[in-house]
Amino acid sequence: MAEPSLLLAPGRERSLERRHPWVFAGAIAEVEGAPVAGDTVAVRAADGRFLAWAAYSPTSQITARAWTWDEDEKVDDELLASRVDRAVAARGDLEERTDAVRLVFAESDGLPGVIADRYDTHVVLQLSSAGADRWREALTAALAARPGVVGVYERSDLDVRRREGLPPRTGVLAGEAPPFAASIAERPPGDGPGWSFVADLVEGHKTGFYLDQRENRRVVSDLAAGRRVLDLFSYTGGFSVAAAMGGAAEVTAVDSSEPSLLLAAANLERNGFSGAHLVEADVFSHLRLLRDRASRFDLIVADPPKLAFSASQLNRATRAYKDLNLLALKLLAPGGVLVTFSCSGLVTEDLFQKVLFGAALDAGRDAQIIGRLTQATDHPVLLSFPEAAYLKGLVIRVS
């Protein structure tokens, strides 16, 4: 019996030939056979040429995600386990620096829709696509087999699963449940200070912590000595701890979540810093209050949540980014530094810089870019899949 296939419309094969892993619904001319969500299908050009084996997702605009371009390679438990092994081996250089690592980064590691983050003895698994969901047991087994892992916990509670026709799923997949507050450490590659955190792996943002900001916490720490620091959207205090450990004169952390601020307080205390000001408030409203009080800071970190989930939200998101950074720039003392981020993949680095230009212009501040930041090295960007480059940051100094 012939395998199910997706036949592409004429001229729509180029992206797969360039090894981009996504096939959009509009590129498909015909579905041959009767595949269901999560099935492995052959993707073929209009002339019948084999292009890739891919996971089928009929309810999504991304109707197929490629597993392999090798027609002779079988998509099975062994293939997925080998991909996990390869991804973990590529992170070996981080073992001496931290016990919290992104082990698998989806398409960049040849495992579309699969995120796996290790927090010391536990792995948190997120499955965001129909194909990834189909291979839950194989992926769990591969991750549970890692040395030192005592439990695998699922956090497939992402909104994107609805577009895949999948319900949210959370819970223990293997071994022990994670502790309420998992302890993790980060150590510098050189002789600088290390720090540690607790993270909520069950209810926290993403899989519990912002692993993608690891290197950027070092940047903030290096900038913080003697400065008055304002940490916006502080979550559980990653940047606040970095600033405090870097010798900040004072630290103010602002977030709208009381549970996040409680963890931020715990993280500051466990690193020996008890003098931070923790403010539970809407960040935009609090910035206006600080503006009206004529407050001034020497270093401001702005790391908002994702603001653009679709192209239709892009204009609203750019207005929000401009408003946020305009207010932040107005609060900077002369010579102050703004470290600002966007984790919205649809907001390109070029667009983000234009937003900052508009904010600086409206704030009446002359500003210089003195640094460009991106996601941590365990969040690599496959050259054929630039969509993986979602996090961008700018270090701005005002005159």
Image (tube, grey):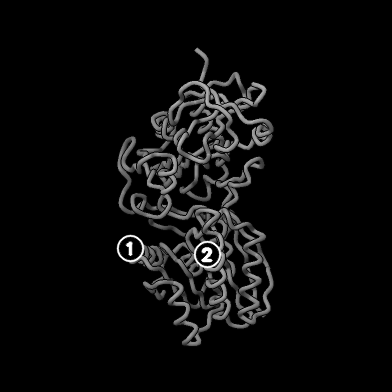
Say which quarter of the image contains residue 365.
Answer: bottom right
The residue closer to the viewer here, 237 or 314, is: 314
Q: Is residue 354 above or below residue 298?
A: above
Going by the numbered disc 2, the residue's amino acid type is Arg
Say which quarter of the image contains residue 93.
Answer: top right
The residue closer to the viewer here, 349 or 219, is: 349
- Using a 10 Å C-alpha cutoff, classify the residue at mark 1 as few (fewer than 14 neighbours), some (14 to 19) or many (20 or more): some
Q: Earlier in the sequence, mark 2 or mark 1?
A: 1
Where residue 284 is drawn, which disc sits there? none
Q: Is residue 70 left or right of residue 295?
A: right
The location of residue 287, given as percent across then percent down, is 47, 77
Q: In the rendered view of the protein, which quadrant contains the C terminus?
A: bottom right
The location of residue 135, given as percent across then percent down, is 43, 30
Question: Disc 1 on helix, strand or loop?
Answer: helix
Q: Is residue 175 left or right of residue 390?
A: left
The location of residue 214, given as percent across then percent down, is 53, 56
The location of residue 300, given as percent across then percent down, is 54, 73
The residue at the point 53 percent across, 31 percent down is 83
The residue at the point 52 percent across, 15 percent down is 2
- Mark 2 or 1: in front is 2
Q: Is residue 251 above or below residue 201?
A: below
Q: In the rendered image, which residue does mark 2 sit on?
A: 316
User: What is the distance, in whole Å, between disc 2 and disc 1 at their CAs?
Assistant: 28 Å
Question: Disc 2 on helix, strand or loop?
Answer: helix
Q: Is residue 337 left or right of residue 239?
A: right
Where residue 259 is drawn, which disc sits there? 1
Q: Is residue 270 above or below residue 293?
A: above
Going by the numbered disc 1, the residue's amino acid type is Pro
The residue at the point 48 percent across, 40 percent down is 60
